[in-house]
Image (tube, rainbow, N blue to C red):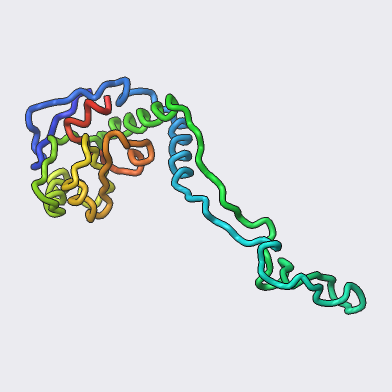
Amino acid sequence: MRVDVLSADGNATGKQVELKDDIFGIKPNDHCIYLAVKQYLANQRQGTHKSKERNEIAGSRKKLKKQKGSGAARFGDIKNPLFRGGGRVFGPKPRNYEIKLNKKVKKIARNSALTYKAKDQNIYVLEDLKFDAPKTKQFVDILNKLELNGKKTLLVTKDSDKNVILSIRNVAKANSVNVNSLNTYDILNANALIIVESAVEDIV
């Protein structure tokens, strides 16, 4: 599959790049995509949630009233979970939500996501971007020329260019990622994928 390389003005430059079928034209595996997205979202969780149980509450251990004869239900100390301010029964504890996933499964998932984007013709290849200074307006102009302004857009760059990152940071629904950090979730979460020309080789 060959795709035209576009300039920052949105016009074809006359050059083309090859999007190899073993990456952008495979038979998509939806289950691998599900596992990769599940792993990505799980790994974002901090797992620092915590509530105090009965033995961690500050308070007296004295029995509030005698066991029998009051006509009411029996209970022990003020830290009883039934009371306001008491401990919580089986509350959340800090835990690690990370999920292990084989590299081959992650690769299949990423290639499947790229295949879906290629089939829907939502992949744009741009000439390498070079901003002399952080200019949000400059990147918005590029999105306008590509008719992508207002859509979820992911810019895939070869290197982490500070000026490009700062230029895209304040654009609504737009994000940038280094080609080495490209993952299945980011690909699927974007309506359109803008890949700079030099990053296509790294993906392949």
Residue closest to the eye, 195 or 49: 49
Q: Residue at x 80, y 76 (%)?
A: 64
The structure residue drawn at horizontal position 30% and vertical position 26%, both measured from the top left corner, is: 24
- For the residue pair 156 and 7, the one nearer the viewer reads as 156
State whether residue 133 appears in this view: yes
Q: Is residue 8 left or right of residue 103?
A: left
Q: In the picture shown, does residue 76 fall above or below 41?
A: below
Quadrant for residue 104, please give it. top left
Give the quarter of the image for residue 198: top left
Q: Is residue 1 above or below residue 58?
A: above
Q: Position of residue 25 (x, y in %)?
A: 31, 24
Q: Residue 179: where, in percent of width, then height?
A: 27, 34
Q: How many marks?
A: 0
Say which quadrant the C terminus sits in: top left
Position of residue 101 relative to residue 69, above or below, is above
Residue at point 15%, 54% (across, down): 136
Locate residue 5, reporting x and y percent: 13, 31
Where 102 falls versus 10 (above or below)?
above
Question: Measuring 84% from the left and 71% from the top, which residue is drawn there?
Answer: 74
Left or right: 27, with 175 as reference point: right
Is there any visible trace of residue 88 in the rendered image?
Answer: no
Q: Which residue is the extreme one toward the bottom?
A: 70
Rendered image quadrant of residue 200: top left
Q: Is residue 116 left or right of residue 197?
A: right
Q: Position of residue 121 (x, y in %)?
A: 25, 34
Viewport quadrant of the N terminus: top left
